[in-house]
């Protein structure tokens, strides 16, 4: 994916240039107009912030969502779910997968649809609630489990190594997204630091 992607290097380079410009502009602006409230990324405070907060700032739910959805995507592609096959094993795998999805959705409904359900908020609503906060996680796990069940029954996954490789392949496919996430997140949080009074 990375070697075939012709746009990624230019986007990454552009984000790095914008980040460097922000460092320079914040330094000049804070020195030229001290009363503006703009903070410099080259000041002692700015350097401590960049080096001390880098990992904590990147550790957002978005990073976890990218990883989970990528693993789910990889398992779906490797399982053969997207190829409509007319074999006995494939039709049996579809039936077992649909049964799993019915049970999975039923369990989620029990945890959200009845009064005082465990995934509802304190006032009984869905938005915001533990359900809305875990929606991407629930979808990702449902997709992964469906793909792994389908692939096992259909014969696409013959060993635990096949399952692991399918999950990892999705993350490998999403590696460019991870790089873009790191660059965009750093730029976003740098802008917030510079312009927050």
Image (cartoon, rainbow, N blue to C red):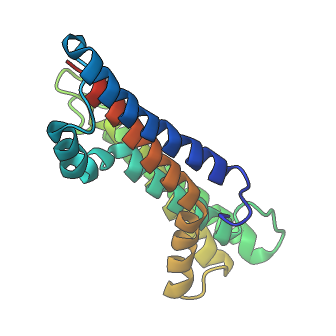
Is residue 117 visible in the rendered image? The answer is yes
Judged from this view, the residue extending furthest toward the right is: 86
Is residue 38 or residue 189 the one in the foreground?
Answer: 38
- Residue 157 percent location from the top left of the image: 61, 81
Which quadrant of the view contains residue 23? top left
In the image, taking residue 149 as reference, residue 9 lies left or right, namely right
- Residue 136 percent location from the top left of the image: 43, 44
Judged from this view, the residue extending furthest toward the front is: 32
Is residue 162 or residue 158 the one in the foreground?
Answer: 162
Identify the image quadrant of the C terminus: top left
Is residue 54 or residue 125 the one in the foreground?
Answer: 54
Identify the image quadrant of the N terminus: bottom right
When the figure is inspected, residue 144 is found, relative to residue 162, above or below; the finding is above
- Residue 22 percent location from the top left of the image: 41, 32
Q: Residue at x 72, y 76 (%)?
A: 89
Q: Residue at x 69, y 63 (%)?
A: 81
- Residue 42 percent location from the top left of the image: 26, 39
Which quadrant of the view contains residue 60? top left
């Amino acid at each position: 994916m990375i070697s075939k992607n012709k746009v990624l290097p230019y986007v990454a380079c552009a984000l790095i240039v914008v980040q460097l410009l922000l460092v320079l502009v914040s330094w000049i602006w804070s020195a030229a107009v001290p009363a503006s409230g703009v903070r410099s990324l080259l000041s002692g405070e700015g350097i401590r912030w960049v080096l001390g907060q880098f990992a904590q700032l990147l550790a957002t739910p978005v990073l976890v969502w990218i990883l989970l959805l990528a693993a789910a995507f990889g398992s779906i592609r490797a399982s053969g779910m997207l190829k409509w096959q007319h074999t006995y094993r494939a039709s049996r795998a579809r039936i077992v997968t649909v049964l799993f999805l019915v049970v999975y959705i039923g369990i989620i409904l029990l945890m959200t649809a009845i009064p005082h359900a465990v995934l509802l908020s304190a006032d009984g609503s869905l938005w915001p609630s533990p359900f809305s906060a875990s929606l991407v996680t629930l979808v990702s796990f449902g997709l992964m489990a469906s793909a792994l069940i389908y692939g096992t029954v259909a014969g696409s996954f013959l060993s635990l190594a096949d399952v692991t490789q399918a999950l990892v392949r999705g993350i490998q496919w999403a590696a460019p997204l991870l790089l873009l996430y790191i660059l965009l997140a750093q730029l976003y949080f740098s802008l917030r630091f510079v312009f927050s009074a």
